[in-house]
Image (cartoon, rainbow, N blue to C red):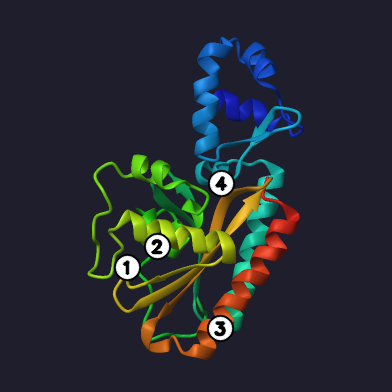
Amino acid sequence: MLNILNLLSINPKGLTLTEISEAIDVPKSTLYPIMQTMLERNFASLEKNSLKYSIGISTFCIGASYPRNKYMLDFIQKIMKNIVSSIDETCHMGILEGNNVFYILKEDPIKDMHFRLISYAGKRIPAYCTALGKALLSEYSIEEIKALYPDGLKPITKNTITDFAILEDQLKKIRETHLSTEVEEVTEFLRCYAVPLTSKGKTAAAISISIPTFRATEEKNKLAIELLLKAKEQIDAVDLD
Protein backbone atom coordinates (compact mmCIF):
# COMPACT_ATOMS: atom_id res chain seq x y z
CA MET A 1 0.00 0.00 0.00
CA LEU A 2 2.88 2.39 0.76
CA ASN A 3 4.24 1.93 -2.76
CA ILE A 4 0.83 2.90 -4.13
CA LEU A 5 0.63 5.98 -1.89
CA ASN A 6 4.12 7.05 -2.94
CA LEU A 7 3.16 6.63 -6.59
CA LEU A 8 -0.08 8.59 -6.22
CA SER A 9 1.69 11.36 -4.30
CA ILE A 10 3.86 12.19 -7.32
CA ASN A 11 0.98 11.91 -9.79
CA PRO A 12 -1.53 14.55 -8.62
CA LYS A 13 -3.64 14.14 -11.79
CA GLY A 14 -4.27 10.53 -10.85
CA LEU A 15 -3.53 7.12 -12.38
CA THR A 16 -5.68 4.33 -13.76
CA LEU A 17 -5.55 0.81 -12.36
CA THR A 18 -3.52 -0.28 -15.40
CA GLU A 19 -1.02 2.54 -14.93
CA ILE A 20 -0.56 1.72 -11.24
CA SER A 21 -0.22 -1.97 -12.06
CA GLU A 22 2.51 -1.32 -14.62
CA ALA A 23 4.35 1.19 -12.43
CA ILE A 24 4.68 -1.07 -9.39
CA ASP A 25 4.73 -4.37 -11.35
CA VAL A 26 1.71 -5.90 -9.60
CA PRO A 27 -1.02 -7.78 -11.53
CA LYS A 28 -4.32 -5.94 -11.80
CA SER A 29 -6.12 -8.93 -10.29
CA THR A 30 -3.98 -8.57 -7.16
CA LEU A 31 -4.07 -4.78 -7.15
CA TYR A 32 -7.83 -4.31 -7.53
CA PRO A 33 -8.91 -5.55 -4.05
CA ILE A 34 -6.14 -3.44 -2.48
CA MET A 35 -7.44 -0.35 -4.26
CA GLN A 36 -11.00 -1.14 -3.13
CA THR A 37 -9.81 -1.27 0.47
CA MET A 38 -7.97 2.03 0.02
CA LEU A 39 -11.16 3.59 -1.39
CA GLU A 40 -13.30 2.27 1.47
CA ARG A 41 -10.87 3.71 4.02
CA ASN A 42 -10.43 7.00 2.15
CA PHE A 43 -6.73 6.45 1.49
CA ALA A 44 -7.55 6.86 -2.20
CA SER A 45 -10.32 8.47 -4.24
CA LEU A 46 -11.60 7.47 -7.67
CA GLU A 47 -12.69 9.90 -10.38
CA LYS A 48 -15.61 8.11 -12.02
CA ASN A 49 -15.28 9.64 -15.48
CA SER A 50 -11.55 9.07 -15.97
CA LEU A 51 -11.32 6.04 -13.62
CA LYS A 52 -8.17 7.55 -12.17
CA TYR A 53 -7.12 7.05 -8.58
CA SER A 54 -5.64 9.83 -6.47
CA ILE A 55 -4.72 10.29 -2.82
CA GLY A 56 -7.62 10.54 -0.35
CA ILE A 57 -8.09 12.36 2.94
CA SER A 58 -6.98 9.43 5.15
CA THR A 59 -3.40 10.08 4.12
CA PHE A 60 -3.49 12.72 6.86
CA CYS A 61 -3.53 9.88 9.37
CA ILE A 62 -0.18 8.49 8.23
CA GLY A 63 1.49 11.87 7.88
CA ALA A 64 1.40 12.09 4.12
CA SER A 65 2.95 15.25 2.74
CA TYR A 66 0.81 15.59 -0.36
CA PRO A 67 0.56 19.40 -0.88
CA ARG A 68 -3.13 19.50 -1.77
CA ASN A 69 -4.10 17.47 1.30
CA LYS A 70 -1.86 19.58 3.54
CA TYR A 71 -3.59 22.67 2.20
CA MET A 72 -7.02 21.18 2.88
CA LEU A 73 -6.09 20.12 6.42
CA ASP A 74 -4.86 23.64 7.21
CA PHE A 75 -7.99 25.12 5.60
CA ILE A 76 -10.32 22.92 7.66
CA GLN A 77 -8.37 23.58 10.85
CA LYS A 78 -8.69 27.34 10.29
CA ILE A 79 -12.46 26.96 9.92
CA MET A 80 -12.56 24.88 13.09
CA LYS A 81 -10.66 27.58 14.98
CA ASN A 82 -13.22 30.14 13.78
CA ILE A 83 -16.03 27.88 14.96
CA VAL A 84 -14.48 27.54 18.41
CA SER A 85 -13.91 31.29 18.72
CA SER A 86 -17.58 31.87 17.83
CA ILE A 87 -19.12 29.37 20.24
CA ASP A 88 -16.47 28.62 22.92
CA GLU A 89 -16.96 24.87 22.59
CA THR A 90 -14.80 22.02 21.30
CA CYS A 91 -14.72 21.15 17.60
CA HIS A 92 -13.55 17.81 16.14
CA MET A 93 -12.83 16.44 12.68
CA GLY A 94 -12.92 12.72 11.96
CA ILE A 95 -13.05 10.10 9.25
CA LEU A 96 -14.46 6.58 9.14
CA GLU A 97 -11.89 3.86 9.75
CA GLY A 98 -13.55 0.46 9.53
CA ASN A 99 -16.56 0.83 11.83
CA ASN A 100 -14.97 3.48 14.07
CA VAL A 101 -14.58 7.24 13.95
CA PHE A 102 -10.89 8.15 13.74
CA TYR A 103 -10.36 11.62 15.20
CA ILE A 104 -7.92 13.68 13.10
CA LEU A 105 -8.24 17.19 14.53
CA LYS A 106 -9.42 18.79 17.75
CA GLU A 107 -9.77 22.47 18.62
CA ASP A 108 -10.54 23.59 22.19
CA PRO A 109 -11.65 27.01 23.44
CA ILE A 110 -8.76 29.18 24.59
CA LYS A 111 -10.45 30.44 27.74
CA ASP A 112 -10.55 28.28 30.84
CA MET A 113 -13.56 25.99 31.10
CA HIS A 114 -14.89 24.12 34.14
CA PHE A 115 -15.74 21.18 31.85
CA ARG A 116 -13.28 19.95 29.22
CA LEU A 117 -13.52 16.93 26.93
CA ILE A 118 -11.09 14.06 27.39
CA SER A 119 -10.56 13.52 23.69
CA TYR A 120 -7.62 13.76 21.30
CA ALA A 121 -6.59 13.38 17.68
CA GLY A 122 -5.95 9.70 17.05
CA LYS A 123 -8.79 8.47 19.26
CA ARG A 124 -11.21 5.85 17.89
CA ILE A 125 -14.86 5.47 18.94
CA PRO A 126 -17.63 3.29 17.44
CA ALA A 127 -19.32 5.34 14.74
CA TYR A 128 -22.93 4.42 15.49
CA CYS A 129 -23.01 6.25 18.84
CA THR A 130 -21.39 9.56 17.90
CA ALA A 131 -22.64 12.54 15.92
CA LEU A 132 -19.45 12.44 13.82
CA GLY A 133 -19.91 8.75 13.16
CA LYS A 134 -23.55 9.02 12.20
CA ALA A 135 -22.66 11.79 9.75
CA LEU A 136 -20.00 9.50 8.25
CA LEU A 137 -22.41 6.56 8.08
CA SER A 138 -25.30 8.56 6.62
CA GLU A 139 -24.82 7.28 3.05
CA TYR A 140 -24.70 3.64 4.15
CA SER A 141 -27.68 1.31 3.76
CA ILE A 142 -28.87 -0.48 6.89
CA GLU A 143 -27.61 -3.75 5.39
CA GLU A 144 -24.12 -2.27 5.06
CA ILE A 145 -24.24 -1.01 8.63
CA LYS A 146 -25.33 -4.40 9.95
CA ALA A 147 -22.32 -5.87 8.14
CA LEU A 148 -20.08 -3.33 9.91
CA TYR A 149 -21.52 -4.35 13.29
CA PRO A 150 -22.26 -8.11 13.06
CA ASP A 151 -22.51 -8.35 16.85
CA GLY A 152 -25.08 -5.56 17.02
CA LEU A 153 -24.99 -2.06 18.45
CA LYS A 154 -23.63 -2.33 21.98
CA PRO A 155 -24.60 0.27 24.62
CA ILE A 156 -21.87 2.58 25.89
CA THR A 157 -24.21 4.66 28.05
CA LYS A 158 -27.87 4.22 28.91
CA ASN A 159 -28.71 6.57 26.02
CA THR A 160 -26.80 4.73 23.27
CA ILE A 161 -28.99 3.78 20.30
CA THR A 162 -28.88 -0.03 20.03
CA ASP A 163 -31.79 -0.57 17.60
CA PHE A 164 -30.81 -0.72 13.91
CA ALA A 165 -34.26 0.55 12.88
CA ILE A 166 -33.89 3.69 15.01
CA LEU A 167 -30.39 4.26 13.64
CA GLU A 168 -31.71 3.86 10.09
CA ASP A 169 -34.36 6.54 10.71
CA GLN A 170 -31.69 8.87 12.08
CA LEU A 171 -29.47 8.35 9.04
CA LYS A 172 -32.36 9.12 6.69
CA LYS A 173 -32.90 12.40 8.51
CA ILE A 174 -29.18 13.23 8.25
CA ARG A 175 -29.32 12.72 4.48
CA GLU A 176 -32.22 15.18 4.32
CA THR A 177 -30.86 17.85 6.69
CA HIS A 178 -27.07 17.30 6.42
CA LEU A 179 -27.03 17.48 10.23
CA SER A 180 -26.30 14.75 12.77
CA THR A 181 -27.17 14.91 16.48
CA GLU A 182 -26.20 12.80 19.47
CA VAL A 183 -27.11 13.32 23.13
CA GLU A 184 -25.19 11.43 25.84
CA GLU A 185 -24.82 8.28 23.73
CA VAL A 186 -21.09 7.96 24.24
CA THR A 187 -20.38 10.49 27.03
CA GLU A 188 -22.78 11.49 29.78
CA PHE A 189 -23.70 15.18 30.00
CA LEU A 190 -22.54 15.84 26.45
CA ARG A 191 -24.51 16.84 23.35
CA CYS A 192 -22.90 16.82 19.90
CA TYR A 193 -23.80 18.09 16.44
CA ALA A 194 -21.97 17.13 13.24
CA VAL A 195 -22.09 17.59 9.47
CA PRO A 196 -20.68 15.32 6.75
CA LEU A 197 -18.04 16.77 4.44
CA THR A 198 -18.31 15.58 0.86
CA SER A 199 -15.85 15.06 -1.95
CA LYS A 200 -17.01 14.18 -5.46
CA GLY A 201 -20.47 13.46 -4.10
CA LYS A 202 -19.30 11.09 -1.35
CA THR A 203 -18.85 11.61 2.38
CA ALA A 204 -15.13 11.78 3.11
CA ALA A 205 -15.00 13.27 6.63
CA ALA A 206 -17.10 15.10 9.19
CA ILE A 207 -16.74 17.90 11.71
CA SER A 208 -18.61 18.33 14.99
CA ILE A 209 -19.26 20.64 17.92
CA SER A 210 -19.53 19.14 21.41
CA ILE A 211 -21.51 20.99 24.08
CA PRO A 212 -21.94 19.98 27.74
CA THR A 213 -25.67 19.59 28.37
CA PHE A 214 -25.66 22.24 31.11
CA ARG A 215 -24.40 24.78 28.53
CA ALA A 216 -26.63 23.54 25.71
CA THR A 217 -29.11 26.39 25.68
CA GLU A 218 -31.54 26.81 22.80
CA GLU A 219 -29.49 29.77 21.59
CA LYS A 220 -26.18 27.87 21.72
CA ASN A 221 -27.64 24.80 19.99
CA LYS A 222 -28.98 27.00 17.19
CA LEU A 223 -25.59 28.70 16.82
CA ALA A 224 -23.80 25.33 16.66
CA ILE A 225 -26.06 24.18 13.83
CA GLU A 226 -25.60 27.44 11.91
CA LEU A 227 -21.80 27.33 12.27
CA LEU A 228 -21.55 23.70 11.15
CA LEU A 229 -23.79 24.12 8.11
CA LYS A 230 -21.84 27.21 7.08
CA ALA A 231 -18.55 25.33 7.53
CA LYS A 232 -19.86 22.44 5.44
CA GLU A 233 -20.77 24.85 2.64
CA GLN A 234 -17.29 26.42 2.72
CA ILE A 235 -15.38 23.11 2.81
CA ASP A 236 -17.52 21.27 0.26
CA ALA A 237 -17.04 24.18 -2.16
CA VAL A 238 -13.27 23.66 -2.09
CA ASP A 239 -13.42 19.82 -2.27
CA LEU A 240 -11.46 17.57 0.07
CA ASP A 241 -9.46 15.67 -2.58
Q: Are marks 4 and 3 in contact (CB under 8 Å)?
A: no
Res 220 label: none
Q: Are marks 1 and 2 in contact (CB under 8 Å)?
A: yes
Res 185 label: 1
| Residue 142 in view of the camera | yes
Res 222 label: 3
Q: CA distance from mark 1 to mark 4?
A: 28 Å
Q: Nearer the viewer, mark 1 or mark 4?
A: 1
Q: Amino acid at mark 2?
A: Thr
Q: Earlier in the sequence, mark 1 or mark 2?
A: 2
Q: Amino acid at mark 4?
A: Phe
**Residue 154: percent from left, percent from top:** 24, 55
Question: Which residue is under mark 4?
Answer: 60
Q: Are marks 4 and 2 in contact (CB under 8 Å)?
A: no
Q: Secondary structure at mark 1?
A: loop
Q: Amino acid at mark 1?
A: Glu
Q: Secondary structure at mark 2?
A: loop
| Residue at the (44%, 57%) spot, across then down | 133
**Residue 91: percent from left, percent from top:** 51, 70
**Neighbour class for label 4 at 10 Å: few (<14), some, many (≥20)?**
some
| Residue at the (67%, 15%) spot, across then down | 18
Which quarter of the rendering shows the C terminus?
A: top right
**Residue 212: percent from left, percent from top:** 39, 81
Image: 184 above or below 95: below
